[in-house]
Image (tube, rainbow, N blue to C red):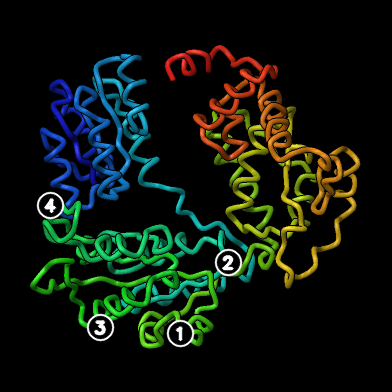
Amino acid sequence: MRVLIVGSLDGYIGAASKIALQRGAKVAHTDSIDGALHALRAAAGIDLVLIDVKLDIEALIRSLKAERFTVPVIACGIGTDAPAAVKAIRSGAKEYIPLPPDADLIAAVLEAVAAESHAIVCEDPAMTRVLRLADQIAPSDASVLITGESGTGKELMARYIHRKSRRAGERFVSVNCAAIPENLLESELFGHEKGAFTGAVARRLGKFEEASGGTMFLDEISEMHPRLQAKLLRAIQEREIDRVGGTQPVKVDFRLIATTNRAIEQEVKAGTFREDLFFRINVVTVTLPPLRGRPRDIPLLARYFVRKYTEANSLPERPLSEAALALLTAHHWRGNVRELENTMHRAVLLAQGNEIPPDAIHLSSDLLAPADAAPAPVVPPAAAAAAAHGARLPGSGTGGLVGKTVAEVERDLIIDTLQHCLGNRTHAATILGISIRTLRNKLKQYTEDGIEVPPPREVDRAVLQDG
């Protein structure tokens, strides 16, 4: 964990640094936003920025977005200064920490940024076999291609291999090839010189240079444009890269791990992925099974996510009922572990009573499952009993929605969810999978249209007034 402190923090730099160092972080300091940007451009591998709330946080966030830095920013200021905290959050800061610094609070922030829940939870033989393979290949420097459906945990496996490798003490640098436009991805990967193109205001080192000594992780590599594939092939073969606008090659030392959710051999046959690059990245293939292919892990993962989100939301611990577990086991899980995690997060927020009942389990319809998917397992008697209590089983119909517009269905869903959450905007937005800002805008429109909207709880009222 590398932490960059920006500003004076009203003289509390020493205390904040000491706490971060005690928690295993490496700490750097700069007085200005320009200094912070310089450190980020130099591929210093910053994981977290702590910035004095008196500085122009909005300008920093704007610069980070313009230059495609994804480092989280935490604002710090004297005491519980509510207006300053609200302004910082609205400017784009992830959190506000009052000064003087509290050791437990800073530790919690560092843990939240560093951990990212990298545990691999499994007991099904289909997954334990994959882990044994990962353990076997991790100590080498061989390139690894991780394949599997979306949501199976490919990045989690990549981080697992990195942690088991000889490079574990060095950087793990991740780039999502599908999320960055082709004209920007080249600069992101290989860096650029000042003036190389419009907007290149300073030299910036690319991800390959940042990963030198560690692991370079390319997520969804099959989405990369063929032109960049040629440049990537040279980087892998020669262990050197050319910055955009540069005149001299730069030596780099990295271990490559890549992922794809496509049948990459078909991409090679179709001519959209270079065959020579495929053989370079495919020294070892690790194929992750879909969740439906590791059924023994469904209850294990479900309970793990219940504990995780119960603790995260400071809610009373509730076990999963047998009927709820039966519903989970019977589901197809097209979205795999990611879908299960979101389902359990909703269930934790919606559950009432002494356990998590089946009506807190909101499952997507099996009508969304792929056409070639295996048939869903027979629903156990416990699941049938759950259905009798009103839980929505896979494949439940939508006949009650016929005749309504999409806007009407969305409005009813938002208002019903808000009522279920007793007016809690934050919980409702989480369940709906939208931002609190989007929810606020929707509710404002409904109010203007004369539709009754559940009032916010007192704890939310101040946030809404400030926002």
Kind of element beneath mark 3:
helix
Q: Which residue is mark 3?
A: 237
Q: Is residue 160 above or below residue 283?
A: above
Disc on res. 188: none
Kind of element beneath mark 1:
loop
The number of discs equals 4
The amino acid at mark 4 is: Ala
Q: Are marks 3 and 4 in contact (CB under 8 Å)?
A: no
Q: Return the x and y of residue 319 as percentages of the image width and height.
A: 70, 39
Q: Which residue is mark 4?
A: 202
**Quadrant in which residue 321 is drawn:** top right
Say if residue 120 shows up in the picture: yes
1 or 2: mark nearer the eye? 1
Q: Are marks 3 and 2 in contact (CB under 8 Å)?
A: no
Precedes in sequence: disc 1 or disc 4: 4
Precedes in sequence: disc 3 or disc 2: 2
Say if residue 283 shows up in the picture: no
The amino acid at mark 2 is: Glu
The residue positioned 42% from the left and 16% from the top of the image is 466
Marks 4/2: CA–CA distance: 39 Å
Kind of element beneath mark 4:
loop
The amino acid at mark 3 is: Gln
Q: Which residue is mark 2?
A: 149
- For residue 158, side relative to residue 310 (left or right): left
Precedes in sequence: disc 3 or disc 1: 3
Label 1 environment density (alpha carbons within 10 Å; few <14, some 14–19, many ≥20): few
Marks 1/4: CA–CA distance: 36 Å
